[in-house]
């Protein structure tokens, strides 16, 4: 009987020690639109980040959560911030939004004004930072892949990207400037100046190369402090 | 000395009794866009409601608070709900919104999709009802005063008004159907089918007759239970 | 030999007589957008008019020509007026346009301003009337079949229909008020207030009932003088 | 009496000789929108070209005609081509259009689709070239003067400028690439990256510097063959 108790205590001690040495995994939420919704699927950029962590033997150290919904704009993120992000107490939140805020202006007449885009963006960051989440901002990559700024929405995408860059500076957030990363990539790898098929399927949604490029940008930031 | 204390106690008792018999005034917030922002100014519909209460000797029983901001759409109301409404613990909240959600589609490309209009509207009502505020919904009155549904946005305004009517039913809210009230008024009083000048200055913002019509619709609902 | 010549002369006389008694068929051009493009196909309204003439034994008296191109607005008609209509010296021209002028405002940001819609419409009529074509105007039928003016574009469609009605009066053109015909039909036959499936497939393009309704409106006008 | 006749004949001969040695002035039409409408006023670019010709003593050799109307898009030019340009038998026609075709997409929902912009542009050129007018094309300069392609319409303006460049090549027209000229100027002279005030009053309409820059581009082309 006593022996049994001893064994039980030993097992208990093991678990306590284990939980001390193996810390709770870093919880990472990817917050965005249809691009992020697809990112959580096989071949998607979140899945590719998971694969990269696996290779480095760090898969146990991170919990990756996709929180992308198609058609979302900045204010949709704000509406579901509590339910889909804050309630999960994330350590890191990637925010990748903006394509629909610009695109839906011409396709439905329901884009987002620049000043309100900024206002909602800042409101989201403040709520996340108040919960001590580390927030990483991404600029919207592309609506059309032409590399000479002749895609219809290029000016507006540049404008909204600049708003995000300024917010990143002001609120001390890490920035992944996908707008710039994609543009540089297109300058090198899109000599025929095609509007799709290099990093995207349709000018907006990522193909395999696009998902890999995004994953390669995000993975290194997970281990930053 | 003792006598002084007695008097003091009597005064104290008087105030306690007074606060028991004269209840805290009913706090009413008017939540909306530029129409409501103007409503709080001299001649505006909120001011006219205040005047009506004064005449009835009920001015002490109500505290009217204007919370309208120009250019606001449904999601702007949601963003400032906490600061501008919930923080004031209102007993009654009038929500009058929708003109910009429809109008800005064609003037800026930044209107609000119908499904998202509904989603944000419901989110606001839920938060107000959770705080036991009585919520009174208003349909958007007009963008243009022509009485034969030939104003450019008439179809869309009718559509968004129907969304609000359905929400009122579903969430057991009192409805002031200004869209219908204005249309009926125009049928009777706009024989030349003018697009402004009957109830509005510019097709949207209320003139004296418009402010009076709205005040007359709202005042009776204040005393409802 | 002489006999042969006589016969030849008789045949010649017959043809001359024939062309005198059997007049050149009335040439009718249907000028419009995708609805008219589909109208020339089997089951389309132009085909149904042809069927109706056949039944009345009047098929020889008319030559019906479909001249509809998908996506066309009023100024597209103006651009191809010479090539597709005037060059054919039509006796009658049905003009049925307006849906895209309104619709493309919200779907692409490329609709047509009301004043320019009128200006191009009048320019077309003047050129046709200068060639002595009888011009018959049609109002745009529907974008969505809801019968209570809650389809998004109802106000604007009503507005553009009114412009066409006024032009018809001013330029003494026969009018087929499809906007009104469809609305009356929906009031009687769309009790569930559906947005498609009564007269259209998708809210705009005609189903069998819609094609029949339009054909029934147009056929009687062919024999008018 | 005879002497009088002789004198009269001499005067006649003088005029005949004069008209032989002094050829008919080159007639130049400037065809465009509000920018060109303002260009014909004091200080406007057409007036500045006139001044430059005067200085060079060539004022007699050219007749400059402003044909700009505010709010015009490519199809408005097509509609008034006969009345405002062809009827004047111009030797040279500058076409400067495109700002409203892009801008009105977001401000009214009534811009021009890219494929139709091209179609109407080509139709205009063909009609002018059929009358042996020399046609000089201009790309739209700017909607907003920021020099890093962050003006909302920059992508679309670049796209429509590229369409014009391609048309110039295909139809062997001289091109004044104002889009590029302005961009280069802004890179050198707008270090604060302001959105107006360098070459324009409001981002679109030319100030004194803008009018001079345009005049300097156009004047040398008048004497080309």
Image: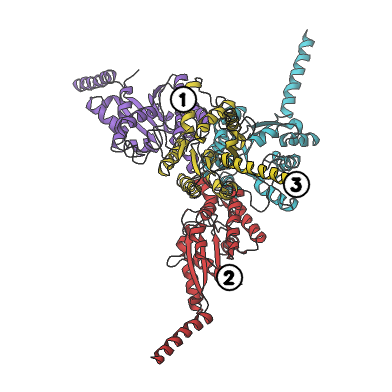
Chain colours: A purple, B cyan, C red, D yellow
Q: What percent of the width, then of the height, locates residue C78?
A: 53, 54
- Point out the frontmost of discs 3 and 2: 3
Residue A180 falls in image quadrant: top left
Q: Which residue is mark 3?
A: D1
The answer to whether residue B143 is above or below residue D203 is below
Q: What percent of the width, then of the height, locates residue A78?
A: 48, 32
Chain identifier of the residue bearing label 2 in the image = C
In this picture, residue A160 sits left or right of residue D33: left
Same-subunit check for callouts 2 and 1? no
Q: Which residue is mark 2?
A: C221
Disc number for residue A125: 1
- Point out the frontmost of discs 3 and 1: 3
- Relative depth, front residue between A223 and D174: D174
Chain identifier of the residue bearing label 3 in the image = D
Alpha-carbon span between mark 2 and mark 1:
66 Å
> What number of labels is visible?
3
Neighbours of disc 1 within 10 Å: few (<14), some (14-19), many (20+) = many
Query: Do the residues under discs 3 and 2 have CB atoms within 8 angstroms?
Result: no
The answer to whether residue B66 is above or below residue C170 is above
What residue is drawn where x is 47% and y is 40%?
A104
- Relative depth, front residue between D151 and C19: C19
The answer to whether residue D197 is above or below residue B207 is above
User: Can the viewer see residue C78 in this picture?
Assistant: yes
Secondary element type, mark 2: helix
Same-subunit check for callouts 3 and 1? no
Secondary element type, mark 1: helix
Chain identifier of the residue bearing label 1 in the image = A
Q: What percent of the width, then of the height, locates residue A110?
A: 51, 40
In this picture, residue A22 sits left or right of residue B87: left
């Amino acid at each position: 009987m006593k022996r049994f108790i001893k064994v039980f205590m030993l097992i208990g001690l093991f678990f306590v020690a284990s939980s001390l040495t193996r810390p709770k995994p870093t919880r990472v939420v990817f917050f965005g639109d249809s691009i992020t919704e697809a990112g959580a699927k096989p071949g998607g950029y979140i899945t590719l980040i998971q694969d990269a962590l696996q290779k480095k033997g760090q898969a146990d150290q991170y919990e990756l959560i996709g929180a992308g919904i198609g058609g979302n704009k900045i204010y949709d993120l704000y509406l579901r911030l509590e339910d889909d992000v804050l309630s999960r107490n994330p350590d890191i939140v990637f925010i990748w939004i903006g394509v629909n805020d610009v695109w839906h202006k011409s396709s439905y007449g329901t884009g987002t004004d620049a000043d309100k885009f900024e206002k909602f963006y800042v409101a989201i960051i403040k709520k996340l930072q108040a919960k001590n989440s580390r927030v990483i901002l991404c600029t919207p990559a592309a609506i059309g892949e032409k590399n000479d700024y002749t895609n219809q929405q290029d000016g507006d995408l540049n404008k909204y990207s600049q708003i995000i860059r300024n917010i990143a500076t002001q609120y001390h957030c890490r920035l992944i400037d996908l707008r710039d990363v994609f543009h540089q990539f297109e300058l090198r790898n899109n000599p025929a100046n095609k509007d799709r098929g290099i990093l995207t399927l349709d000018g907006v949604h990522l193909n395999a190369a696009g998902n890999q490029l995004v994953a390669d940008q995000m993975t290194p930031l997970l281990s930053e402090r």
